[in-house]
Amino acid sequence: MPKSKNTFSSVSAWRRRVAQRAVHAGWAWVQRTGAVSQERPGRLRFGSIGPGTKLAFPQGTVFGAPWIHLGDHCIIGEHVTLTAGMMPDLDLGPDPILTIGSGVVLGRGSHVIADTRVTIGDDTYFGPYVYVTSTNHSYDDPHTPIGKQWPRMEPVEIGPGCWIGTGAVILPGARLGRNVVVAAGAVVRGEVPDHAVVAGAPARVVRSWDAEKGWQPPLRTPAPVPIPEGVTPEELLALGELSDT
């Protein structure tokens, strides 16, 4: 009797493994098929989408696509929301509202809400759950519910080469320069100069680059050692395997 029970348990475990593999394989097929690219835009008709750009499946809310322009070789993670205009089916005129440069990475669950112009420069990376908006609620009238008061809108500009940490919030009117680091959870408004690190809520500059003195205050960790020129991807993989042994 115990032998039969063990045999039954083994068969059940085998069936679960087979079912699990089938589910994972099916989901991988759905993700590949549902991804959006220049060659396979699906229902979305962006103002432009560059070669090599891909929106992972499942996508977040996307509307105002004709006024959204995506550069080349961008990676848009799962559940990323991209909107142009305050609501779907509006005529927003001849100019783009949301412009995302080439080589941009938007992490999973991020939101870019462009009720008015939002520009994200080339090679800018977002961590997960970043929130960028060109619109904020107003509360001028103390007698009217805030959600019923007309919002304020200001353009947002994020320069090239920036890194925006997980959970950061970029508010209307923000203008970030080149190669700015925004710490995780920071709330950014106003102007941030080139080569600055900002943190906090509201965010303030905590480190900046000086052409003569370098980073001020100085970095506490040594710079990473660059990969030597001429090293092939195959050699890097071999080194990785050696380090694991």
Image (cartoon, rainbow, N blue to C red):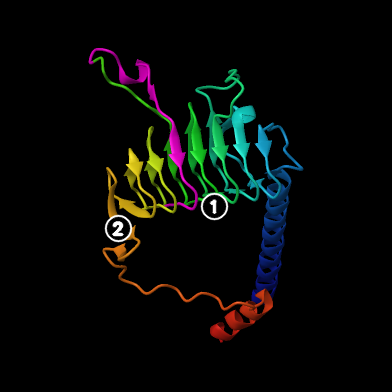
Dot 1: element: loop
Q: Residue at x 31, y 20 (%)?
A: 146
Q: Amino acid at mark 2?
A: Arg
Dot 2: element: strand
Q: Position of residue 11 (x, y in %)?
A: 71, 67
Point out the stretch of residues depicted in magenta. Answer: 142-164
Q: Residue at x 30, y 66 (%)?
A: 213
Q: Residues within 10 Å of mark 1 (few under 14, many from 20)?
A: many
Q: In the rendered structure, does residue 163 fall within the stretch colored magenta?
A: yes
Label 2: which residue? 207
Check the image and name the residue furthest to the front: 212
> Which numbered disc, 2 or 1, marks the residue that appears first in the sequence?
1
Per the model, the C-alpha gap separating discs 2 and 1 is: 21 Å
Check the image and name the residue furthest to the left: 142
Q: Position of residue 8 (x, y in %)?
A: 69, 67
Label 1: which residue? 123
